[in-house]
Image (cartoon, rainbow, N blue to C red):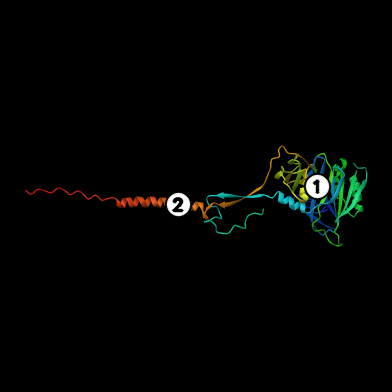
Amino acid sequence: MLALLGVQLTWFIAPAYACGCGAMVPDPAARIAVSEEQSLLRWDGRQEQIVMRLTVNGDAEHAAWIMPVPHRATVRLGDPALFGQLAEAVAPVHRTRYHFWPHNGDWPFDDHDTAAEAPLPGAGGAGVGVVDHQRLGPFDVARLTAGDPAALQSWLRDHGFSLPARLKTALRPYVDRHWEYVAVRLAPDSHGTPLRGALDPLHLTFAADRPVYPMRLSRLATTPQSLGLYVLAAHRMETSGTIGGTPPEVLFAGRLGTRQGALGKLASGTPYLTALAQSFPEPARISGDHELRRAAADTPVQQVIYEDELRRIAGIPAWSLTVGGALAAVVAAVAVVVVRRSRRAVIPPPVPPSTPLG
């Protein structure tokens, strides 16, 4: 599973899939789409980390991505191998489930080969303060404080981007709560090259007394959306509410064993991994950000893919042996009866007494 988010904003933010934790703003005359986003949230009780990787396409050579955060964040490049390790950790287990009687596809109903048909498995003043600016791979990253969406709009305009009116309104609750922003300018290394493919992951770290995943901007979407999120913590985690979507589904929950690489480092001290999925049929009903909390119990969850197989004995379907054996027993019983009857002695009719001569 991965882990997937889905967001499609109107044309002035550009169609975006899986950009639930932020907003993408392209050049005024260009288009950009986020076709996939993979996100991991790690919380150790005091600090939150979010690692995300965007896959983009379109004709935009530059774009700005804005993410609200509750406290001042540090930003660095993440390890691309992390998401492959996550997919491996939550992969379903395969088990064989035997059945006695033949199903469609089993002999004698195997009219075609079905072997290949199995499904694949947040304080600011009145203006914008640039806290920090750095270059990370293809990203120009600025950490901002903004006490007014109009000030953020001015900053974006000074850097070649316009802030859509609906996005400006959606940012108001974050301004009221004195959240800060991470503003990322995406630009390829070579001039004239549009932004396409999987970008390097970004790794954000900020203080948090409780884990939160920003989702409010997703309400700007015009089509049904989905959320997919990995959560690393000391225990199994759950969302505190639905925020306008369907009840979240737990796709995986369990403690990770000894791990190496990027996932092993993040799991140190937070060994419990929870994978959540949620749908938002009406994005306009999204009422806020996802706050996460410890679940009532650390009950493990593991998806299982069953592979049905006809039970066989020495390569022969068990049902045919059973049915054949039963039929053979019946035939043998009938034969015994017939033979016994054929061997029964025939008693000749009695001879009538002779008549005496007179």
Marks 1/2: CA distance?
64 Å
Q: Is residue 288 visible?
A: no
Q: Is residue 227 left or right of residue 28?
A: left
Secondary element type, mark 2: helix
Question: Furthest residue to the left?
Answer: 358
Q: Nearer the viewer, residue 185 or 283?
A: 185
Q: Position of residue 14 (x, y in %)?
A: 81, 54
Q: Nearer the viewer, residue 68 or 298?
A: 298
Q: Position of residue 338 (x, y in %)?
A: 34, 52
Q: Position of residue 39 (x, y in %)?
A: 78, 49
Earlier residue among tags 1 and 2: 1
The residue sitting at 59% across, 51% down in the picture is 308
The residue sitting at 74% across, 51% down in the picture is 85
Q: Are marks 1 and 2 in contact (CB under 8 Å)?
A: no
The residue sitting at 92% across, 53% down in the picture is 158
Count residues near mark 2 (Cα–Cα under 10 Å), then give few for <14, some for 14-19, many for 20+: few
Secondary element type, mark 1: strand
The label on residue 158 is none
Q: Position of residue 89 (x, y in %)?
A: 71, 49
The label on residue 325 is 2
Question: Furthest residue to the top?
Answer: 296
Amino acid of disc 2:
Gly
Q: Is residue 234 left or right of residue 324?
A: right
Instruction: Report which residue position mark 1 lands on.
Output: 50
